[in-house]
Image: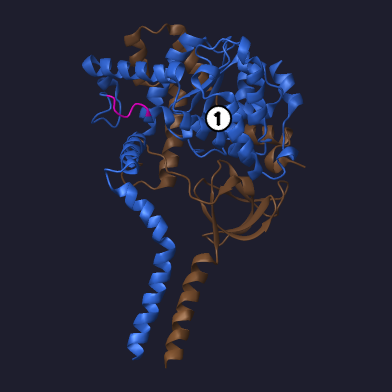
Amino acid sequence: MLKAVITAFALLLALTVTAAFAEEKRWVASDGTTLKKEASISSADLSSLPVGTELSVIESGGRWLKVKTSGGKEGWVYAGRVADAPPAAEVTGDAGLFGGTMQQSQIQTAKADSARSIRGLSPEATQYAKQRGTPELFRKELDKVLARKVSARDLKTFLRDGKIGEYAP
Amino acid sequence: MIRKQVVLLFALGLFTAGNAQAGFFDEVQKFVSPDTKEGKILSGATQVLSSAKDMDYPTELTIGESLALESMQRFGKPVAKESLQQYVNLVGNAVAANSKRPSIPYRFAVLDSPVQNAFAVPGGVIFISKSLVGIMENEAELAAVLAHEVGHVAGKHAISTIRRTQFLSGVGTITAASMKGDRGKQYESMIGDMQTVLFDKGLDKGMEFEADSAAMETLYRTGYDPRAMITVLKKLQKIEATSTKKGSWFSTHPPLDERIERLEAQLGKYPGAASLARVPQRFAKKVK
């Protein structure tokens, strides 16, 4: 009887440990991450993976990891684009602080940025400049800095031309 | 009898687990007590974290824009060469995408300044002086300095220095209306204090080491040679004696030899670092 109890206890312990360590988790930590069909940048794109996406590691192939998404999709990601802990969520103006999920809050940050690039300097910073008597020249220069956007496509071309990261030979 | 043995077995299990954790819990206990040195550190750290965490992104960017306006007046306006500005934005965004805070938009600009300097304002606007770019040899070195500054934005370092300012007490979000009257004066005073920290006194040493370490990690994750963080500091070391100190990386940052020593110790974490990208040709073409 005692043997049976010990065996049951050991089994329970083993199951708990297995459940905790069976799947090695990673989280997408870089903007513009893509799930690829093979462990190569030239292979087909399966889907784009937003920052914060949880992945289970199936196999490690050096600079590339074979992973599975929570939706069951399998593919490869460049190891430099994932981290072993989830990234911190952004606090946005409306929902981020009170119950907004991380992904929502990141989307809102992106939306806020698109709106900002259209209107330039924020009304609050404009008011500050007015109060301080900041010369118009500097306001215009800052507007130019804020308007200079880099698209995901520009960045991919830039990394490919420089043979950087997943584009390295 | 059996029941006793089962209880004993569970007790043994708990003891084993408890024993392994004892040292950890002893340490935690020190932090819980408000009278210990550790407790005081924790209470300070909590205030920093809650303040920086509570500030929403638009507010952070408004503070950043105000500081950006002041910094351009102090150090000079952006250089007029549009191809250089675009190139620096590509390098900067390449590393920012692999930083600890990849989801906010980052903007980079080269300022027409003779002082070797680079700095970040809250919200992700980052400046580097023309003269600092001028001592570099390759793209990885430019990426290293920009990744260091992204590290400050990601760590919300500048914001945490203003946690006790009058303006922020009870205010989560800045509005144009709250910029008028007394509140406006308080806001101006807060921006003034931040300028003193960023451009004169410098951030805490610990924040600088954290930004250096984050930069090396970000370079490696992006695919740039992480040794570039060390080589660029060594280049600064060579010119330190003959350079302007006021408002530069020399006066607002910890001593270069201490930074280099820490980074060299960290380098062991990155196998195959020497084979990663440095991209000297493209850098020379875009910058010179």
Q: Give the left or right position of residue A92, taking residue B216 as reference.
A: left
Which segment is the magenta one? B161-165
Residue B116 drawn above or below residue B56: above
Residue B164 highlighted magenta (yes or no):
yes
Q: Do we see residue B66 in this rendering?
A: no
Chain shaded brown: A
Residue at figure coordinates x 57%, y 39% from the top left:
B98
Q: Quadrant of residue A66?
A: bottom right
Residue A52 coordinates in the image, percent (x, y): 49, 48
Q: Residue furthest bottom?
A: A1
Residue at figure coordinates x 70%, y 54% from the top left:
A38
Residue A151 coordinates in the image, percent (x, y): 58, 32
Residue A115 coordinates in the image, percent (x, y): 43, 28
Residue B101 drawn above or below residue B13: above
Number of numbered discs present? 1
Quarter in which the N terminus of chain B is drawn: bottom left
Q: Give the left or right position of residue B227, taking residue B126 as reference.
A: right
Q: Colour of chain B?
A: blue
Viewer-nearest residue: B273 or A19: B273
Residue at figure coordinates x 63%, y 49% from the top left:
A79
Which residue is disc 1 drawn over? B148
Magenta span: helix, strand or loop, mainly?
Answer: loop
Q: Quadrant of residue A107?
A: top left
Q: Do we see residue A108 in this rendering?
A: yes
Q: Under tag 1, what secondary structure?
A: helix
Q: Give the left or right position of residue A169, taking residue B90 as reference.
A: right
Viewer-nearest residue: A64 or B257: B257
Residue B268 highlighted magenta (yes or no):
no
Quarter in which the C terminus of chain B is drawn: top right
Label 1 marks a residue whose chain is: B
Dot 1 amino acid type: His
